[in-house]
Structure formats: structure tokens, C-alpha cells
Amino acid sequence: MQSNANLFAYNLGRIVPLDEACLHISDLAIQRGFGVFDFVKVQQGQPLFLEDYLDRLYNSARLLELQVPLSRDEMKAVIRELTERNALALAGMKIILTGGYSEDGFTPLNPNLLITQHPLALPSQAKVEQGIRIITHEYVRELPSVKSINYLMGIRLISKIKAKGAEEVLYYKQGIVSEFPRCNFFLVRQDDTVVTPANNILAGITRKNVLELAGRKYRVEQADITLEEVAQAKEAFLTSTTKRILPIVQVDDTRIGSGKPGKITLDLLQDLIELEEQQLTAAKVS
């Protein structure tokens, strides 16, 4: 793993050593937790599905009325330079847009842009083969369509997740499930229909790719999913940039299906890995 001393970051208009990147305490990210971000996986020097992630970043900024200080082309140029300088084989790149330095600690002014890159580890093969346990919690994020830097509830629940021997927490409201703090949720019905929640979610890029991949082989739906339907599912899994697809074998005290990762889940994981490889091949050719 490369040490911080050898990494670079984009900080307020300049690329600097990561250890020198900073914000003033008047920034609304610090004062009020106000800002948006996105997270891109960089593999073999190539940001995967970058256009989709930038679409979501700029949309999150628009919804919070924050002006991104770089055009898309300028943003891609900075990402390219950081990737070359950091030279990490597998990394996560976090793009953070804050509310900016505020004179009264409340009113947004000129947003600040920061981009950092760190080594990334994907889930182990053992975890994929065993599947994970999750718990549920009644909650819906404010402005779910915005990838906000506010993770108050998710962080509060970390100790509860660990105490239950679980990996993640699935939010629900009035019996309808939505999302995890950092992942999207899918289930497979007994008739092999692949379903993911339609409302009160952040539209994940991996979610988008999995819906497209699943649609080539199975019936897919974006719909409300009840806790009862989760308990009766044949399979369940989560999706995210950093986790790809992870099988879910238990929800609270309920075993899902056979209690082992399902065939459709593992099939879609392989399809997703192949899609990433196609992206890498196409990037090298171009």
C-alpha cells in the first residue's frame, strides 16, 4: 500500500501532496455537513464508468444549488493527472464538493472542490462465497437522490451492525425497504425476477449496470419491496462501486433462500466483472 506521503490530491484548484491538502474551518462541510461527493473506482489506471459518475456528481450539485468550479473536461483532466501521479493499480477516487467558506457558518458561498485517491481492496473471495448478514433500521435519508456527505445515521449505526455480527444495515420506512447507507439492494423472487427498490434511493452506477446485465437474462423490475417480500426472497444481494455484488444470506434473524449465495447473484457478479474488463479493454484501445 502506498503511503500518504507518496499520494497527491486536488485541493482548491491545485494538485498538492495529500498530506498538504486542507480546508479552513469556516467551510460548510465542517460547520454544517453540507456538500456532495462521488466515488469512482480506478483500475489499471482507468476510471471505470466515469461519465455516469460525473453525471451523478453534477446532478447532486445542481440539486443542492452548488456550482462545480470545473467543467466536465477540466474535471476529467484533473482525474487523469491524479491517476497518473498516484500510479495505483486499484484505487478509489473521491470527488468532494463542499458548501464553501461561509462568513456566518450557514450560508453557502463559493463551493470548494477536493479530489483524493487511495488504494482500494475489493471483497475477498471467501466473503463472496459465504455471503453476508445484514440488519434493518427504519429510516429514509433526506434527499435520497443526492449523494450527500451527510452520513449521520449510517455512522451512528456502525456499533449496532457490529454487535449483531452483520455487514450492513438496510433502511426501510413503513415496511418498504430502500437502500443501505453506501449500497443498493436487490432481491430475486422465487420466479427468478430480479427486483430493486424504485423510491427513496440513490441511483447507484453499479445498480444501473446490474439492471442492464440482469435484463439480458432475467425479468427485472424497479418497484417497492416490502420486508415480507425480503423474507420470502429466493436470493438477495447488494451492489456498490467498492463491493461490486455481495450475496446476502441473512436479514435480521431471517435466512434468505438456502442460506447460501444464490446462482443468479453469482452469475450477475461474473457478468459485472466481465463488463468492467470490457471497459478496461476499450479504454486501452482508445
Image: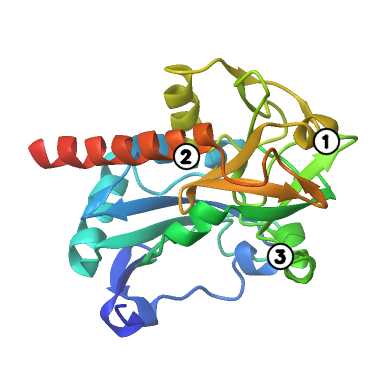
Q: Which residue is farthest right?
A: 174
- Would residue 178 be seen by someone viewing this image from the given angle? yes
**In the visual, does 160 lie left or right of 58?**
right
First reached walking from the N terminus: tag 3 or tag 1: 3
Which residue position is annotated with label 2?
A: 266
Q: CA distance from mark 2 to mark 1?
A: 23 Å
Which residue position is annotated with label 1?
A: 227
- Name the residue: 69% across, 55% down: 133
Q: Which residue is farthest left?
A: 285
Helix or strand or loop: what does disc 3 sit on? helix
Q: Are marks 3 and 1 in contact (CB under 8 Å)?
A: no
- Tell me which amino acid carries mark 3: Ile
Q: CA distance from mark 3 to mark 1?
A: 23 Å
Q: Is residue 225 above or below residue 215?
A: below
Nearest to the eye among marks 2 and 3: give it.
2
Q: Quadrant of residue 7?
A: bottom left
- Tell me which amino acid carries mark 2: Leu
**In the visual, does 79 lie left or right of 255?**
left
Q: Position of residue 155 (x, y in %)?
A: 71, 65
Quarter of the figure that contains the N terminus: bottom left
Which residue position is annotated with label 3?
A: 155
- Name the residue: 31% across, 35% down: 275
